Image (spheres, helix red, strand yellow):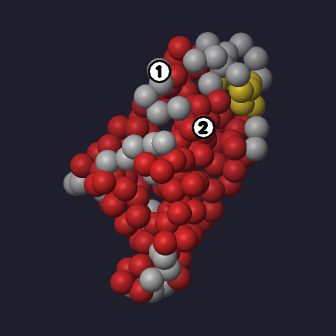
Amino acid sequence: MNERGLFIDPSDAAALINDRVEAIAATLHISTTAARRYLDPQALDELADTMAGLLADEQPGVDLMSQPRDLAIPGHVMGRITAGLAEAIQLYLQHEVSTETGKDHIRSLAQALSLLGQLMSESNGPSTSVPKALAARVASQLERAAMTPQTSTELAAAFRRDAMRLRGL
């Protein structure tokens, strides 16, 4: 990440890599030890490139309420992503609430849910205008929830579909 002009705490990088290993293991029904073999230097470079692009879109550290609301999200998509965030919170409450990372995920999801609610309450039409960075963050949160090993196949598919809908706007 440093080579790409971004800083990531080594423990956060390790957590992201471990998440990727767990997702590979769950998808392929193999042990995490076997899954680590799939993360060669090229795969790690690709992961870093993907993360750098996503982070740029998400504008970390930016106050989203002060950003331009330059993306209109139709009401039916807002309903899906709001429900998706609530489902992700429930997932983390059931499986990851005991870890600090799990608590951080829950806080982040709740903040996004709250911000979406505020923006929806200000909307007068069939769509809600939001900052593009918020949509990128929510899509990433849904994709991350889809990769959680405890997520059922159906719920993971729903998380991925909702994230794709959001990224496609």
Residue found 57% across the figure and 63% down from its top: 46
Please tell me in which quadrant of the rendered image residue 104 appears.
top left
Q: Badge 2 is on which residue?
A: 57
| The C terminus: image quadrant | top right
Please tell me in which quadrant of the rendered image residue 143 appears.
bottom right
Dots 2, 1 in contact, CB < 8 A: no
Q: Is residue 71 above or below residue 98?
A: above
107, 84: nearer the viewer? 107
Q: Amino acid at mark 2?
A: Asp
Q: Amino acid at mark 1?
A: Asp
Residue found 59% across the figure and 31% down from its top: 133
Q: Badge 1 is on which residue?
A: 63
Q: Marks 2 and 1: which is nearer the front? A: 2
Where does residue 162 sit, x and y in percent of width and height?
66, 49
Q: Residues within 10 Å of mark 2 (few under 14, many from 20)?
A: some
Where does residue 37 sit, x and y in percent of width and height?
45, 83
Where does residue 139 sit, x and y in percent of width and height?
59, 45
In this orientation, does residue 154 appear?
yes
* Count of marks placed on residues: 2
In this orientation, does residue 150 appear?
no
- Helix, strand or loop at label 2? It is helix
Residue found 53% across the figure and 63% down from its top: 45
Q: Is residue 157 above or below residue 112?
A: below
